[in-house]
Each structure stands twice: as structure tokens, then as C-alpha cells.
Image (cartoon, rainbow, N blue to C red):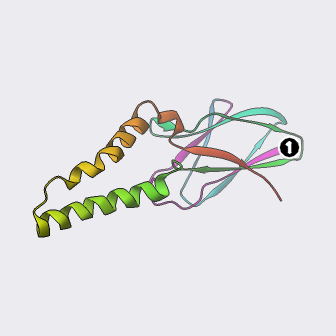
Amino acid sequence: MATISITRPCEISNSLRDYIIFIDGHKAENIANGKTKDFETTPGVHLITAKIDWCSSPDTTITIRDNETKILKVGGFKNGKFIMPIGLGIFVLHFVVSYFFDIKYTLFLLTPFFFLLIYYLTLGRKHYLTLEEQKIS
């Protein structure tokens, strides 16, 4: 039997929600934050997708041989590790600046983050998650 091993690292964003793994269009199993799941499958070409709510990863095609293990890593959107802290920092900066200096328009600095959120909720919903094959060294 061939094995597909999918690892989900610990992440702050989406930590309370499970990702749903689909293999060849069929729901395989949920994967929780910081967990690894192994899926036994037949040798050949398989289409893997991860979903969370209405968002998903791009379809990933892998070719696996008999008695081979392919390792994939699934995670939240690529830029989430620095976009969320920057957005939170700007939000806090707005309140500090408006309180001490009476400047009311710093909240407009969040406009790019708002548009990024709208993108991932609409056109980019199939690119919200990442699903990459890991090279075994």
C-alpha cells in the first residue's frame, strides 16, 4: 500500500478549525491544528485538496508508487504570519495616535488589509490554504 502523510503545523490563524482533506474528490478526514494524519491509498496519481469552510487550497496532484510515502504540508495562507501582526499593530497605532495626537485618519492604513480579506473571501478562496509536497532528504 502507498501512504500519503499530511502534516499541519501549529498556527494561530485557523487554530480552532479543522482542515478537511479530500483525496480524489472524496472526503478523507479532518486534520486538527498541529497534527499529522496518514492515509493509505492505492499506487498511482491522486488529487489532494484541503478545505476550511468555503475556502480551500489549490488542487495538488501527486504520483505515488507502491510502498512509497509522500509527505505533504498544509497550512494557512502564505502571508498570514506577518500580515495579521502588522494589521493588529496598525489598529493599535491608530488608537494611540488618535488619543495622544488627535489624528483621526490613521485607520485608513488598514485599507490594504481589508482588500486582502475581501480577496481571500471571494476570488482567492481557492488559494487561502497552501498544500505542498515536502522533499524527503
| Position of residue 46 measured from the top left corner of the image (x, y, whole percent) | 75, 33
Image quarter hosting the N terminus: top right
Inspect the image, locate mark 1, and give the three-letter code of the amino acid beneath it: Met
What residue is shown at x 47% (from left), y 53% (from top)?
A: 80
| Closest to the observer, 73 or 16 | 73
Give the farthest residue toward the left.
102
What residue is shown at x 48% (from left), y 58% (from top)?
A: 81
| Position of residue 136 measured from the top left corner of the image (x, y, whole percent) | 81, 56
State left or right for residue 70 relative to residue 6: right
The answer to whether residue 15 is seen in the rendering is: no
State left or right for residue 5 relative to residue 87: right
What residue is shown at x 13% (from left), y 55% (from top)?
A: 104
Q: Which residue is mark 1?
A: 1
| Position of residue 120 measured from the top left corner of the image (x, y, whole percent) | 43, 38
| Closest to the observer, 16 or 61 | 61
Q: What kind of element bears circle 1? A: loop
Image quarter hosting the C terminus: bottom right
- Say if the magenta span includes residue 4: yes
Numbered range of the magenta stretch? 1-24
